[in-house]
Amino acid sequence: AKELGRSDWQLYSPLMDSAAYKSYHLEKGLRNALLQDEFFIEYQPKVHAQSGEIDSLEALIRWNHPEWGRVSPGDFIPLAEETNLIIDLGDWVLEHVCKQLQRWKKQGEKVVPVSVNVPSKRLLKRDFVEYVEKTLAKYEIQPSFIEFEITESSIIQHEEHVKKVMEELKKIGVTFALDDFGTGFSSLSHLKDLEFNVLKIDKTFVQNIGDKGKHQAITKSLLYLAHALDMKVIAEGVETTEQLDFLLQHDCPFIQGFIFSKPVGKEKIEEYLRVRFL
Ligand code: C2E
Ligand code: CA
Ligand code: CA
Ligand code: CA
């Protein structure tokens, strides 16, 4: 091996495939990405099923790395959550969304509420409420135009604290959605103790509606539960007319999914806001 020329050695090592090696690079890339402005936002419409109008939007972060191309949030969000990067990243998203809302307002566009995903790690930081209030004020955004989506699984260990933060922000008019509803096993106790404005039925149920049996039964009972509790409910990940039909038959009032639109850039949203979907 000693004979290898300088340029040959270390070109490739199977170790480079290791998860640790990859996440090391990904993490370095992430830190750099914030500084280099490599993130952007796409918005996905949440559609009012009866009227076909856009009810609101979900902001989803996107990362375009100069060499790797698009990196999926499914790959970098979990990593960011392990480090404190998720805090800066989350703040970047809220700031960016508020800036966009302000721009739309100034352009005279129709403005709809936007939801932002917030991990419990951010929500539980001491300054969160103050930070949100400050940011909304800075861009002159009415709090009712911002909704935070929190996943069920992220709440479990910190229920009391999450409850307090939610109460403070709800007081000023910010709303909250329970994301991935149905996937955490203590759903019912959360519904009782934390007053979410919206339930988002997880896409794993929606996407398996075609299999009949259990997924249909679960989706139906999640809808029933939401109606009984007088809560706004939305199904996510709706892709097919079969899924849509089933949801409409069972009175699901709001739909999010590729059947209407993938997450898209702001220009496309501006077009959408001038038309109806159905
Ligand atoms: P999520 O919050 O559950 O977001 C919904 C995901 O489902 C998005 O994936 C969206 O593009 C995708 N989706 C929507 N409709 C359909 C459909 O009809 N079919 C299928 N197959 N997928 C659909 P995305 O954008 O890749 O995000 C994945 C996850 O990454 C999100 O899941 C969320 O947990 C996280 N994430 C994305 N953006 C942000 C962000 O700005 N902040 C934080 N903290 N997390 C984010
Ligand atoms: Ca979400
Ligand atoms: Ca979700
Ligand atoms: Ca999810």
Image (spheres, grey):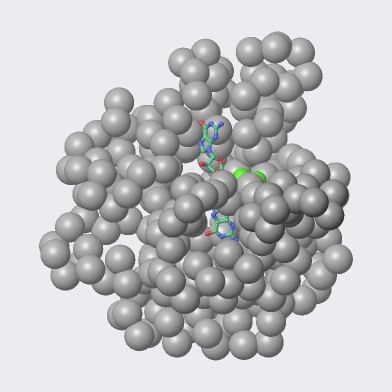
How far from the left and from the top, in percent, is residue 189?
83, 54
Along the line of sight, which residue is nearer the eye, 200 or 170?
200
From this view, report whether residue 97 is shown above or below residue 138: above
How far from the left and from the top, in percent, is residue 25?
66, 61
Residue 274 left/right relative to 188: left
Q: Residue at x 20, y 43 (%)?
A: 271
Name the outermost residue toward the front.
3
The C terminus lies in quadrant: top left
Is residue 206 shown to the viewer in this render? yes
Is residue 188 shown to the viewer in this render? no
Q: Residue at x 84, y 49 (%)?
A: 1
Q: Quadrant of residue 110?
A: bottom left
From this view, report whether residue 12 is shown above or below residue 21: above
Along the line of sight, which residue is nearer the eye, 165 or 74?
74
How far from the left and from the top, in percent, is residue 226?
64, 41
Residue 119 left/right relative to 214: left
Q: Residue at x 44, y 56 (%)?
A: 66
Along the line of sight, which residue is nearer the eye, 174 or 106?
106
Q: Quadrant of residue 14?
A: top right
Q: Residue at x 74, y 27 (%)?
A: 218
